[in-house]
Structure formats: C-alpha cells, structure tokens
Image (spheres, coloured by chain):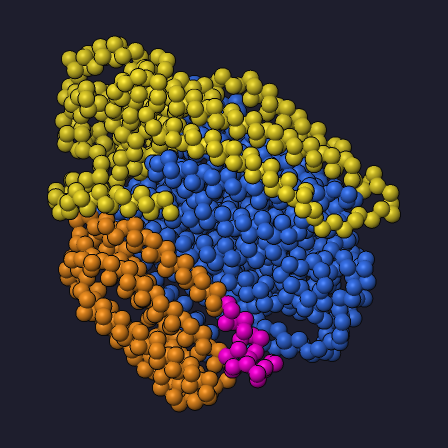
Amino acid sequence: MKFKWPVLSVLFVIATVLAGCDNRLLVLDPKGPQAATQAKDIMLSIGIMSFIVIAVFALLAFMLTKYRASKQPKDYEPPHIEGNAIVEAICVGIPILIVAYLSFVSVQSNYKVEARPEGYGDKEPLVVYASSSNWKWHFSYPEEGIETVNYLYIPTDRPLEFKLYSYGPITSFWIPQLGGQKYAMSDMVTTLHLAADEPGEYMGRNANFSGKGFAENTFDVTAMPQDEFDDWVKEVKKTAKPLTEEKFNDLLEPGHLGKSTYTGTHLDFSPAPEGHHHGSSDESGKSNEHSEHDSMDDMHSEHESMQH
Amino acid sequence: MKIDHSLPLEYSTEENRLKILGFWIFLGAEIMLFATLFAGYFTLANRTGNGPTGAEIFEITPVLIETFLLLASSFTIGLGIHAMRLGNKKAMLTFFAVTLILGLGFLGVEIYDFVVYVHEGAAIQTSAFTSMLLTTLGTHGAHVTVGFFWGLFIILQVRKRGLTPETANKSFIFSLYWHFLDVVWIFIFSFIYMKGMM
Amino acid sequence: MDFFDRFAIPHASPAIYASMVAIVLTSVAIVAGLTYFKKWGYLWREWLTTVDHKRIGIMYLLSALLMLFRGGVDAIMMRAQLAAPESKLLDAQHYNEIFTTHGVVMILFMAMPFIIGFMNFVVPLQIGARDVAFPRLNAISFWLFFMGAMLFNISFVVGGSPDAGWTSYFPLAGNEFSESVGTNYYMIAIQIAGIGTLMTGINFMTTILKMRAPGMTLMKMPMFTWSSLITNAIIVFAFPVLTVLLAMGTMDRLFGTQFFTTENGGMDMLWANFFWVWGHPEVYILILPAFGIYSQVISTFARRNLYGYKSMVWSMVIISLLSFLVWVHHFFTMGQGALANSIFSITTMAIAVPTGVKIFNWLLTLWKGKIVITTPMLYSMLFIPLFTIGGVTGVMLGMSAADYQYHNTMFLVAHFHMVIIPGVVFAMLAGLTFYWPKMFGFMLNERIGKLTAWIIAISTLVAFMPMFFTGLDGQARRMYTYSEATGFGPLNMISFVGALGLAAGFVLLVYNVYYSTRYASRDISADPWDARTLEWATHTPVPSYNFAVEPQVSSEEPLWDAKKNGHELFKGEYKEIHMPNNSGVPFIMSSIFFVWGFSFVFSLWIPLILATIGIFACMTHRSFEKDHGHHISVKEIEETEEKLRGA
C-alpha cells in the first residue's frame, strides 16, 4: 500500500512539530488570561480533531488495503448495499456529540473573552482608546491624560479595556500573546478586554488588510508592574509636548511614523464615535440635528440586524 | 410541436411549461433581490447623517395615488389573462393596454415624487438613508419601466400573431411579473412609507 | 491627452509592460492563425453561436483552465515574494493587486466555470435529456461569464488592477482609499459574470426538475445531478444578494451614494455582512458539485453502488440550508457580542455533521468493494485525507473565541486552501480525467495522470501545512513582507517550494493533454471506465441530440442495471427530434456587455448609454424573434447512429 505512508509521515511530522513548537508559537504562548483561554480552546480542539483525522485515515487505509481489486478474486462481484440505519446513526451521532461538546466549550469561552478578565480582585480596569489611521496606531489614556503613537505601555495584573475605532479603513487590533483581535471601525467603538500577567515586550499589530502600508502597521507593547507604569506616566507628563489638534491632524496623514508621546489626548477635540455621532464627521462643521436618543436606537437596530 | 389541448393555451406545450417554471424560479431570485434591498433599508433607515429623515420627506398623497394605480393595474392584467383564457383577443388587448397606461401613470407620479425629494434635500448622495431609499424605490421603478416595454411588445405580438401557445405563454408570464411588482410595492408601501410616516 | 491618461497603469512595472506585449502578440497570433487556416467560419458556426450544452460545457472548462493558470501565476508571485524576509521582488502595491486578483480569479473565474462546465456537460446526459431547458439562455450565461472574466483580466494592463482584497471591504474599497479604477473593474466584471451565473441557476433548476428521463424520480437521480440541483438552488438564492451588493458598491464609487462611506450615516459593516451572506453559500456552490463528482467517481471505481444514498442527499440539503445561516463567522471579531458569536459558532460547527456523514458514506462505499485505482479515483482517495485536515481546521475556526486568534492570519489561509484545493480542485481534475474520453474521444495517459495527482497532493501539503504554524505564530494574511526577526522565513520558504511543486503538477497536466492528444488510442468504447450512469450509455462522441431514443430508468444506476441486470434502457423506435437553432445573439449581446462594462469602469458615459441601448435592442430582438428550432429527421438519426455504432 504505497499510499498511506506519505500521509502517515505527514501526520507524524505535524505531531512532532506541534509538540516541539508548542511553547514558541505566539498564540500558544499566552501571557494573559484571555490568550490563555483561547490557547486552551485551540489545544483542546486540535486534540479532538486529531482523533477524527486519525480515525478517517485509519478507515481509509483499511478500506484501501482490504478491498483493492488486486486482492479480490477475479470473479468477485461487490454486493449492492443500500445503507444501514444503525451505521448511519453512528456516523451522525458521533459528529453531533463532538460538535455539541465543542459548542459548549465555545459558548463558555465567548462569554469569557467578551467580559472583563476575572481574578484581579476589584481593580479598576485601565481604559485605553486605541485608534488606527493609515498606517499608525494612536493610544489615548484618558484617565492619565497622555497619548502615544505606535507603542503601548500597560500595567500587569490589572484588567485592560481597549476602546477601538479607526480613522479610515477597518483595522484589527491584535496582541497575540495577550488575546485575540477585534476590529476597529470608523463609525462605532468596539471593546476588547485583555490583561497581562507577566511583564515583557509583546508584538502588536493591525491584522486586517488596510492598504499599502498594512504590513508595517505594527506597534510594540510593553507590560510592566503598576508602579513602574505610574512612574512612566509621571515622566511623560513632565517631558512630553501637548497634543494639539493641528499636530494630531498631521499625525493622521497617511504614511508611517516612528513612536511619539504627548500629554493630553485627541479625545478632547476629536472624540471617539461612541454612539453620538455615528458616521457624520465633525470636520464638516455641521452639528448633528438628531438627538442622542435617535442614535441610541440606531446602534440598537444595528446590533439587531447583525444578529439576524 | 406537441400541443396538449386539455390544458390552457399558455401551458399547452412542453416548452411553455418549462418557461413558466423557469420564470417562477426567476421570481424566486427576484424575491431575494428585493429582500436584500429591504434588509439594507431596515439597516440604514435611521442613519440619516446630515440629511432629512423619512418622516420629514414622505407625503401620503402621491404614495396613495401610486398604490391605487398599481393595484388597479394588477387587477386589470388579471382581467386581461381571464379574457385570454376565454379566447377574447380584443378584450385581452384592451385590458393589457389599460394595465400599461396605469403603469405609466404610476411611473409619472413616482418620478414627480423623486423630483420633490431632491428639491427637499434628499438626493441619492445625501445620506445612507436617502441612498438606500432611492435605490430601493428606483429598482422597483426600473422593473416597472422594463415591464412597460415588455408589455408593449407583447401587445404588438398578440395583435399581429393572434393568440398562439407562444404569445399566450408570453402574456401569462408577463402577468406573473406584473403581479410580482405589485406585491413588492405593497411591501414598499407598508414597510417604507407607512412605517416611515409613523 | 487627459482623456487617455485614465487608461494608464498607475503602478507600472517591467512585468506589466511585458504582459502587455505578450497579450498583443498572442492576440495577433490568434487572429493571424484563424485567418490563415480559414477557421473563422468554423469558429463562428460551431462554437461562438452554439447552444449545445456539451460545447458550452467544454468552453467553460477551457476558460476555467486558462484562468487557473492566470491565478496560478499570481500565486507563484506571492509565494516567491514571501519566500524570504524583506524581499524586494514586489512592492506593497503590486502584492496587494496580485492577492486580490488571485482570489477573484480563482473563486469566480476558475472554480465557478469549472463546476458550471461539468454541470453543462454532464447533467443533461445524466438525466437523459436532449439539452438544457433554455439552450439560448445557456449560451448567454456562458458568454456573460466569459466577457466578465475578460474584462476583469484586462484590468492589469488598462487602468490598474483592484487592490482591496477579494472581499473588497469598504471603506478601503471606496474612492477615498482606492483611487484607481481597479475596484470599478471588480464591481462591474463580477456583476456581469454574476448575472450569467444566476441565469445558469435558473436554467439548471428547471432542467433538472422538468426534463428527467421517464422513471427517474427525484430519489433516483445520480448524485452529481442531485448536487447540481442543490447548488443551483443556492445560486438562485445567493447571487441576487451579490447583484445588489455590487450595484451598491458601484454607486458608492461612481455616483457618490453613501452606503458604505465613513460619513453621513454610511455603514462599512453592511458591505461585510452582505458580502458574506452571498460569500458563504458561494463556498458551498463550489464544494457540493465537487462532492457530486467524488460520489460518481468513488462508486464507479469501488465497483459498488453509493453507500447511504438518502443520507447523502439529505446531508446536502442540510448543508445548503445551513450555508445561509453562518455568514457572521467571517467576522466574529466585529464586536457583535458573545451571544451572536455563540449562535453563529454553533451553526458553523453544525455543518461539520452533514459533511462528516458524507465522508463516512464514501468510506463505506469502499467497503466490500473492488477498488481500482485509476487517476480519477486517486484524486478522490487523496481528497479524503487532505480535505479532512481542511475540514477539521474549519471546525476549529468555528470556535469563535479561538477565532479571535486565527482570524486574518495564515492559519485561515491554510484552512481554506486545504478545503478548496482538495475539495474543489482535485474534484475538477478527477472530473476532467473521468469525462475526458466522453468529451474528446480518447483517454488521458494514466501514468502521467497518477504522477500529476501525487505531485499536486504532496505539494498541497508542503505549500499549506506550514501556514497553519506561521498563522499561530502571528503572521497576518495579506502582508507583503515581514522582518527577519519574526522568524517566519523558513516556513514560508517551504511554502514557496510547495507552490513550485503545484506549478509543476499543473504543467504536467498540460503535458499530459499534449501527450495523450498525440499518442492516445482513439479506439475506445463509449463506456471506458465501466461506469454506472446514463452519460456513459450514449455514443462517444456524443451526437448533438444526446440520445436517439429517450432512455427508460428504474434505479439510480440505470446503465449498471442495463449491463448487469438486463434492464432495457432504450425502448421504442426513432422519432423525429426537435432541437434548438444556433444563434449569434448571445455572443453579440455579451460583447456589448463587455463594452458596457468597460465604459462603466472608466465613466465613459456616452459609450455606456449606447451599449445600454444595444443590450436592450438585443433583448427586443429576442422578444420579436420567431425561432421554433429545427427537426432532425428519422433518416438522419438512423445514419448518425449507424456511423457512430460502426466507429
């Protein structure tokens, strides 16, 4: 049977590489509770799926070795078999059980990754507004009153709440070792809950294609204990220049920029699209005639329509 | 060609039966087309940006006239098909002509309505809401326009060639199309105009 | 000169200039060749005006192969660029254009015509019909597809290719961020081809529902016909969404509407939603006919009837329904919350159940069989394990919390290639080898064929397995380059080697066609594979009327019954056969559509209006035309049958 060996060897290679790489692939090397939940789900599903793959391979190999024409008598006539209720019930039942179990896990994890991470006592989350523009990331710390471009400092052992939106194409905010990604869009704010357990440097990037400068649309993440983070904030407040509207508009121009730091945030003069001015841009100078109430309805209907 | 005389003329040949089934499937696709437009409309109905809302631009009078004209035309084309089944060519052509005139009246009022919208600052570029509104209405209007010419050609053919399995089949299929446009209009009337004015 | 500036390529490179020259030279060579060999009349009479489903099917398949190579060149260029870190082979703009056209060409202009080509050739034969329900409409479908594909393909030499990804998400695809006409090409070329596909859907649904041979009830239809029926139903319900979507996109770009803009209430998410409401069923439009082909091939070469016929049918019906209920899984990360994600996560994983049933049924078809490994069977046997890998990673992606990590990464890219290549492409190659003798009267070489299958299968693994790992290591898709520090280099190099292997496999396929055309025996029977269904019951080459006498059917394997159980297929005498006439109008109308599309892309309003009038003129002509087809007399049938039997 010349056929099963290549397949089996590939499987073997996959298994070895998986086992070997386990701690090196970023996604499977989590440094925060959300990424850990996701990595756990991924490993669990790989395990169950390998079982299915092996079962299918084994069945196929068995059929191909046993029922080859070369191994049958010349006058053998294969029988006519319509199907068998019990066999087919098993073929339906086992996948249903597996899918049901995975669904159970999936739903649980959904609520976990969409909520504030647990296990940090009653620590208030740090709110960071992360907005993208072609092809940069702007991080505003409204409570601290500072803003950075293309780099992110975060405290460890404290929930993080990222408010995501975009000045331009849809982007996706992603720090693989802290947790999965979420979209940043121009007409609404999405929320991503993360937390970092260990101090360190992490890779962050925009994962959603956004044009010419997409590949370099990355940012550095540094996680540090809370007191170091506080020192950094103080340092920034002392040394950095204030962020003016003019300066911010310069930053929004398409292109790549290095890292920079400012006091104050752009939220004061260019607020995030949090429900109250969906889409209609402030730059047009016209005030929005519709009440807050209307737009809340609007956001609501938006969510409804997405659930259908 | 085998003609089965036990069936109405428009169903009498194999080819005719195929065409009628094919057209029903086409109408299935059309339902999806308008369903997509409606889904888009419901999503964008409140996203009026800096433009007017539906309540601000919708007026009941022209819409009622449009509704009346189109419903009446659906009734007359039904009478036309009935006359066709009875073999009364003259009555059939009269009813078809009345149908098309009513359709033309509908288009006239709709175009008038569009001009008013644009004057009130609700052009197709104004906001997501007006883009979606005018596209949905416009798609229906374009269907009526195409239907007008199609119907006209059928009248010409029936006049010249008489009631044959082929022309009867075309007329019947056309009537399905026209009824369908009427149904779509009822949805537009209820879910765009009535809902928007409330 | 301003007028002509718009046709210039915004980001020209030597490669593009070389392609321009190559395109001009090839066109000149074709025209000169046709003139020299006096083949214009033949081409017009036998191909351009044909309404014969078999010829239309063959034209679909040839176009699909052509597009396979176009999309394949794109793929090689991408993999070459990514083979090493910080490679300077392509710049960002070119890379963006290439992955965009690779996606569009492979899905819409390669896979779609491939499956529709097989439907055209096989379905009427398999149900014992003389042609499809609306032969003229069928020709229009093909030519609209063809003109759409050509329009899309000239984009890279006239005006610039689309560069916003095959999903073309707004606002990136809007005027503000995609200034060139590239995305106009995307909107309009796909629109034209899409209308053709919608017509195909209506045509084949009617054909299958109404034109089956006497005795062939729905539950006695061969599995490929079943899969075609369901596929066409999906087409009829999914493609209108695409029509509306593309019209909205076109209006946003050309008429200043506000559907997906960032101002005045525009909603970019609406594009993503509508796109995938069409896009996900589209995936099943591709895979179900492929499943149909595998079912035919596996039961033929296991020398056994298909196991679990009923559950095969029901699983396809369930897949088709579920396919409309899972679109949100393409953007779990859009922030619709845990509840919506949970619902769509469950519906997504639920699709694994009917798909699993199909895999087990194929395996059980082998059970107690007498398996002969021919080239089509080899593709099918390679399909099962490879597709299983692709399929189970799909279940993994369906777990929405984990999808936050897979989304937009190479893991996803690896998944859908491991599904589409073994699922669809292997099926197309299996089908091509399987039906080749019926189409052309000789068989493709088995030795070269099997070698090709092995090379393609192994290369697929080599090319795409590494991407699962780079994806989990943080390599996003659509990145034109990466730094050395990321460590993605070695695995991407392996992928590149795999891509070269795939290219070698496809070149070998072409060589096989050449070799077999030259050397293969023409003396083959009408049923060279010892198959089981009606398409093998007629002569090779198939006469224009398919069957001289309408076949009688009493099971889902009528030919097998006739061979083994003494079932009488053809009862009765020759009768006059009514056939449709050829017509040049479909070709002419579609050519006007090409002009229409081209004018639209470049906002040339006067030609656009003229072309629109031309299209309506063609339709008016059709309305008034009296065309009752022609009849083939009994004598003519006798002569043809005599000749074919003798041959």
- Which residue is nearer to you in this view: C357 or C450? C357
The image quadrant that residue C609 belongs to is: bottom left
Q: Residue at x 34, y 23 (%)?
A: A117
- Above or below, C9 against C60 in this view is above
Q: Position of residue A64 (x, y in %)?
A: 74, 37
Q: Position of residue C282 (x, y in %)?
A: 49, 49
Q: Residue at x 37, y 24 (%)?
A: A175
Chain whose colour in the figure is yellow? A
Q: Position of residue C71 (x, y in %)?
A: 51, 43
- Which residue is nearer to you in this view: A270 or C302? C302
Whether residue C511 is visible, yes or no, is no
- Which residue is nearer to you in this view: B101 or C122? B101
- Above or below, A236 against A101 in this view is above
Q: Position of residue C343 (x, y in %)?
A: 42, 40
Q: Colour of chain B?
A: orange
Q: Colour of chain C?
A: blue
Magenta-colored stretch includes residue C443: no
- Above or below, C531 against C473 in this view is below
- A200 left or right of B61? right
Magenta-colored stretch includes residue B10: yes
The image quadrant that residue B180 belongs to is: bottom left
- Magenta stretch in the rendered image: B1-22
Q: Residue at x 38, y 27 (%)?
A: A112
